Structures are given as C-alpha cells and as structure tokens.
Amino acid sequence: VIIERVTGEEVSEADVRVAANSKLFESAPLEKYLARAGRQMNVKDRLVIAEALAEVIVSDSRISSKEVRFFNMVAEAFELTPAELAGLIESD
C-alpha cells in the first residue's frame, strides 16, 4: 500500500520477494548501490524514499534497533542531513 501510494504503481508481495532475492545485492553492497543511485536523484526524491521507508518501519507499531540501523544506513547512503530529514529544506 505504501509503495503504491508513493509511486503510483501496484506492487505485489511476490514482486517484493523477487526484488529482495535479486542478484543486484550480490553484485554490490546495498550501501554502495544506494549511494550511487542517490547521486542521480534530487534531495526531494531521496526524502520521499526515506519517508516511505520510515512509514514501513513504523507500520507494525514496533521499531527494532535493526530497523533503526537500516534507516540510518539508507539516510547516510543518500547523504540526507538531519535538517532535510526533519523537513527543513531551503527554498530557492
């Protein structure tokens, strides 16, 4: 539901499982892949992904330390600052 709302595309559980098991993660560590992909996105797009991830993490009303570490890794790979994560983005 979250992915569909954010992207406008319907994604099945099977699609998520296929992506999670893809060879992509064997060819490059996730942090490096995210950093490389993040350089091709503007800050607003990186924030949309981070916000969607946060929504997924809190969706079961339980947040583990592993989930927090994962979120922090994604935010760092995307080079998102605490201010950006808090919604404090400079306007032009």
Image: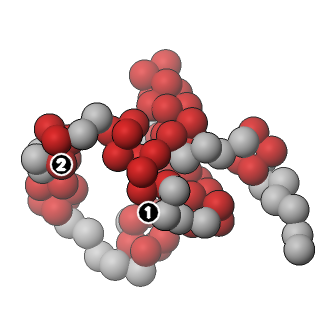
Q: Which residue is mark 1?
A: 2
Whether residue 56 is visible to the viewer of this picture, yes or no, is: no
Characterize the local packing of mark 1: few (<14), some (14-19) or many (20 or more) Cα atoms within 10 angstroms.
Answer: some
**Looking at the image, residue 43 lies above or below residue 54:** below
SS class, disc 1: helix
Comparing 85 with 92, the one in front is 92
Comparing 72 with 65, the one in front is 72
**Looking at the image, residue 83 lies above or below residue 41:** above
Q: Is residue 10 left or right of residue 36?
A: left
SS class, disc 2: helix
Find residue 6 and report its horizontal and vertical position in percent.
48, 70
Please, which residue is most extreme toward the top here?
65
Please, which residue is most extreme toward the bottom here?
8
Amino acid type, label 1: Ile
**Residue lying at 57% horizontally and 41% vertically, measured from the top left:** 75
**Looking at the image, residue 54 lies above or below residue 16:** above
Q: Which mark is residue 60?
A: none
Q: Earlier in the sequence, mark 1 or mark 2?
A: 1
